Image: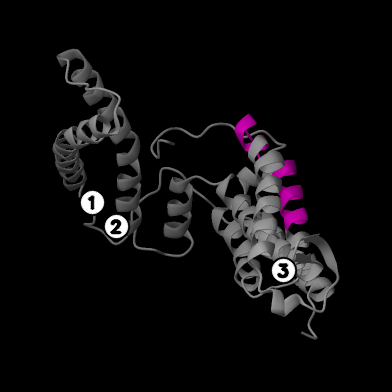
Amino acid sequence: MTDPYAEREAVPTRAWLHRLNPLAKLGAVLPAMVLLLFVRDLATPLGFVVISYALVLGGARLSARAWAVLLLAVPLGVLVLGVAMALWTDPAQVAATPAVLRIGGWTLRAGALATGFATGLRIAALLALALIAGLTTTGPDLVRAGVQQLRIPYRIGYAALAAYRFVPRFGDELSVIRAAHRVRGTHGGRSPFARIARGWGYIVPLLAGAIRHAERVALAMDSRAFGAHPTRTERHEVPFRSRDVVFLVLMLAASATIFALFFPWQL
């Protein structure tokens, strides 16, 4: 989990997507994601998968796990989902299409496969478009961009940053509580019931720690006169530059081109 108050790391030149404003990346993909919900063909989502993969693989800083998900897990998921949805397709709706496989009295038709893989590709396209911003944007930067460009009240934005910082702290406190339980010999067994009982025992200490931390954060914010003025200075600026405008315009143009070329408007 990223510390919202930590100093920013230097971003390599190759990872140019990380240098863009979060709002530009979101605005570039949201219209296409909304329209993809109404698409039923194969070519349109496939076009968005290709362009999204080109952007992410060429402009994002990816870990080995992310590479594995993009190159192995997503294609495998599309294949499994496409076949599964083909099996669930109503045979009466695809009775006029050619048969691909016959097993006894059961027939798998090309129309069912087309419907199944259209669904799988549509989900993959939505995921790939979401990854453009998801893999290259941090939560704190998104909040700061909302405060600076969208004029979201900073009371809401910085409250979100404070809540965002709670997550890694809960992880640290949970590890401490688990270590304390092991030292006291209350770790329990490995059965499912023991795991449930052990997890239930973590709830009260975590809640107590959360309340203490919330009180400290509230006192710290009050001592700094948080909310006393309509505006406040920013430690980290997230500007909306000309390159963000260029990226936004090009992505919207590419999305419009894909819909114009591939979407079967006659349907």
Element type where label 2 sits in the image: helix
**Amino acid beneath label 2:** Arg
**The magenta segment:** 49-67
Image point (64%, 35%), residue name:
62
Residue 189 quadrant: top left
Front tag of 1 and 2: 2
Which of disc 1 and disc 3 is earlier in sequence? 3
Circles 1 and 2, Cβ within 8 Å, touching? The answer is: yes
Q: Which residue is mark 2?
A: 155
**Amino acid beneath label 3:** Thr
Residue 157 quadrant: bottom left
Q: Which residue is mark 1?
A: 226
Q: Is residue 8 left or right of residue 25?
A: left
User: How far apart, in angstroms, are the residues tagged by discs 3 and 1?
Assistant: 54 Å
Between 235 and 156, the one nearer to me in the picture? 156
Q: Position of residue 123 (x, y in %)?
A: 63, 60
Image point (73%, 49%), residue name:
53
Q: Is residue 61 visible?
A: no
Circles 3 and 1, Cβ within 8 Å, touching? The answer is: no
Image point (71%, 79%), residue name:
93
Q: Is residue 67 visible?
A: yes
Residue 101's tag is none
Query: How busy is the neighbourhood of tag 2: few (under 14 within 10 Å), some, or many (20 plus)?
Result: some
Query: How busy is the neighbourhood of tag 1: few (under 14 within 10 Å), some, or many (20 plus)?
Result: some
Q: Position of residue 116 (x, y in %)?
A: 69, 64
Between 77 and 166, the one nearer to me in the picture? 77
Q: Which residue is mark 3?
A: 115
User: How far apart, in angstroms, are the residues tagged by discs 1 and 2?
Assistant: 8 Å
Image point (55%, 53%), residue name:
22
Which of disc 2 and disc 1 is earlier in sequence? 2
